[in-house]
Amino acid sequence: MTRPVLYIGNKNYSSWSMRPWLALKWGAVAFDEKIIPLGGEGYGQSQIREVREVSPSGRVPALHLGDLVIYESLAICEWAAEQAPALWPRDALARADARAASSEMHAGFAAMRRDMSCNIRRRLAAAPDWPADTQADLSQLFALWARVLERYGGPFLFGQRSIADAMFAPMCTRLRTYAVPTPEFARTYCATIFADAAFQEWERAGEAEPWTIEQSEALYR
Ligand SMILES: N[C@@H](CCC(=O)N[C@@H](CS)C(=O)NCC(=O)O)C(=O)O
């Protein structure tokens, strides 16, 4: 097999890119990465020319495996887990539960994603006033984390580090960026993510990036 190539967006902003990148790193799957700076013409409409050239959805991440392109972050994570099965919990029921949580992240939390655009290096002094649907997403997030941390004993969501943590890692950075009042158990969980070596590698690269996306910076300016 030719070496996989993962096309990603700016590390500071592209939460969907972070997820499979972490899964591949955690699974010790060798790959090359290519960053396509997002923003500018076509952004937000899946019409950035450089992205369309490498991804049929016009969005990143996209993993090139020879002549096949796997797009959609969760599908790339699933491929990573086929190379490194420990990326999902060993127990079948826990694995199903972790898949449910990962799918919920992939399909849900739309209000949080709308109002708390990923911006890893940014820190707001105080949390803005969010509408009810964003508050509801936050309550849902904390309820989900509380349930699985209690059931599987932590320190990761399903005990050992798994794809579910890769899926939720950008939610930890959002809580930090937007100064969200966060219960102790969730702060402890996020500290576990922030201490992870692969996460730190991504974060450092994001902090050093020269590009900005105006749309994201304009939020709560
Ligand atoms: N459902 C997709 C979402 C991917 C996505 O929205 N990626 C953003 C960057 S984080 C993108 O490529 N945006 C380009 C655009 O909006 O034109 C996934 O899970 O991979």
Image (cartoon, rainbow, N blue to C red):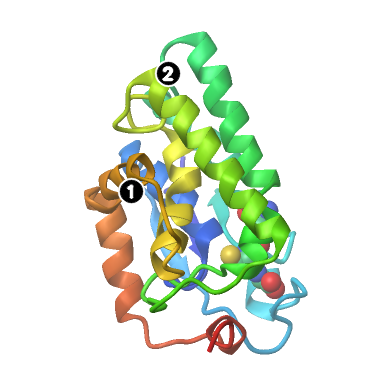
Q: How busy is the neighbourhood of tag 2: few (under 14 within 10 Å), some, or many (20 plus)?
A: few
Q: Residue at x 62, y 61 (%)?
A: 113
**Visible residue check, residue 2:** no
Q: Position of residue 180 (x, y in %)?
A: 45, 62
Hey, what amino acid is under mark 1? Arg
Question: Which quadrant does ligand 1 occupy?
Answer: bottom right
Q: Quick one: which residue is furthest to the top in this view?
A: 92
- Callout 2–callout 1 Cβ contact below 8 Å: no
Reading the image, the residue beneath label 2 is: 151
Question: Residue at position x 33%, y 48% from top?
Answer: 187
Quick one: 201 or 2, which is closer to the camera?
Answer: 201
Q: Which residue is mark 1?
A: 187
Q: Is residue 220 left or right of residue 126?
A: right
Residue 124 in percent (x, y) is at: 42, 78
- Ligand 1 within 8 Å of disc 1? The answer is no
Numbered mark located on residue 210 in the image: none
Q: Measuring 38% from the left and 79% from the top, which residue is drawn there?
A: 125
Task: Look at the numbered disc 2 and give the secondary structure of its residue.
Answer: helix
The answer to whether residue 201 is seen in the rendering is yes
Element type at mark 1:
helix
